[in-house]
Image (cartoon, helix red, strand yellow):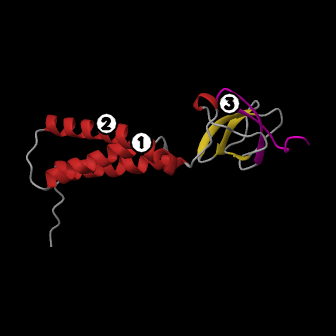
Amino acid sequence: MNIDWTVTPASLWFLLGVLLIFSEFVFPGIIAIFFGAAAIVVAIILFLGFDLSFNVQILVFAALGAVLLLLTRNRLKAWFQGASSKGQHGVEVLPVGTQVVASEDFVDGGGLVHYSGARWNAESAEPVSAGQHVWITGRRGLVLQVSPRPPGQ
């Protein structure tokens, strides 16, 4: 029995789509998943026998990915990242005293923490180790101030 290992444009588009969708798990931003879906749609179109030139394939991929991104991203964002409260001017509310987890050892007082499914830059005046639970004590722009002790202790 011989296996036909011929690579077709449809299989390449399908592979690209799957890779883009899986990349969303590694680099979450809720963007790649829409272009992954668009690549899979192009693969299906080619699989169904439509003869599209490479330029038309790229155009369909780009246009469909952009349309999916613009029309559905905001609706799906809360589902993928979890809902959060918004304060004045749409700034996310991060209550002082909220417990978060350090993603890495802090170097020179800075590192990353996880909060509500997202990674945040953080600063601490005290040493923090990866996996350690810390508490939000404040915020400076996009950087969280954290402490290994709950606020007030």
Which label lies toward us, 3 or 2?
Answer: 2
Please, what is the three-letter code of the amino acid marked with disc 1? Arg
Along the line of sight, which residue is nearer the eye, 41 or 82? 82
Q: Which residues are magenta?
A: 133-153
Q: Secondary structure at mark 3?
A: strand
Q: Secondary structure at mark 1?
A: helix
Mark 3 and mark 1: Cα distance apart in space: 25 Å
> Disc 3 vs disc 2: Cβ atoms closer than 8 Å?
no
Task: Point out residue 8 in the picture as x, y percentages from the top left corner.
Answer: 16, 51
Please, what is the three-letter code of the amino acid marked with disc 3? Val
Please, what is the three-letter code of the amino acid marked with disc 2? Ala
Q: Secondary structure at mark 2?
A: helix
- Position above or below: 97 against 87: below
Mark 1 and mark 2: Cα distance apart in space: 10 Å
- Position above or below: 84 against 125: below
Q: Residue furthest right?
A: 153
Name the image quarter holding residue 53.
Answer: top left
Q: Earlier in the sequence, mark 3 or mark 2?
A: 2
What residue did someone put label 3 on? 143
Task: Point out residue 83 in the picture as x, y percentages from the top left corner.
Answer: 57, 47
Along the line of sight, which residue is nearer the eye, 134 or 152? 152
Q: Earlier in the sequence, mark 1 or mark 2?
A: 2
Task: Point out residue 100 in the picture as x, y percentages from the top left corner.
Answer: 71, 46
Q: Earlier in the sequence, mark 3 or mark 1?
A: 1
Q: Mark number for residue 73?
A: 1
Along the line of sight, which residue is nearer the eye, 1 or 70? 70
What residue did someone put label 2 on? 66
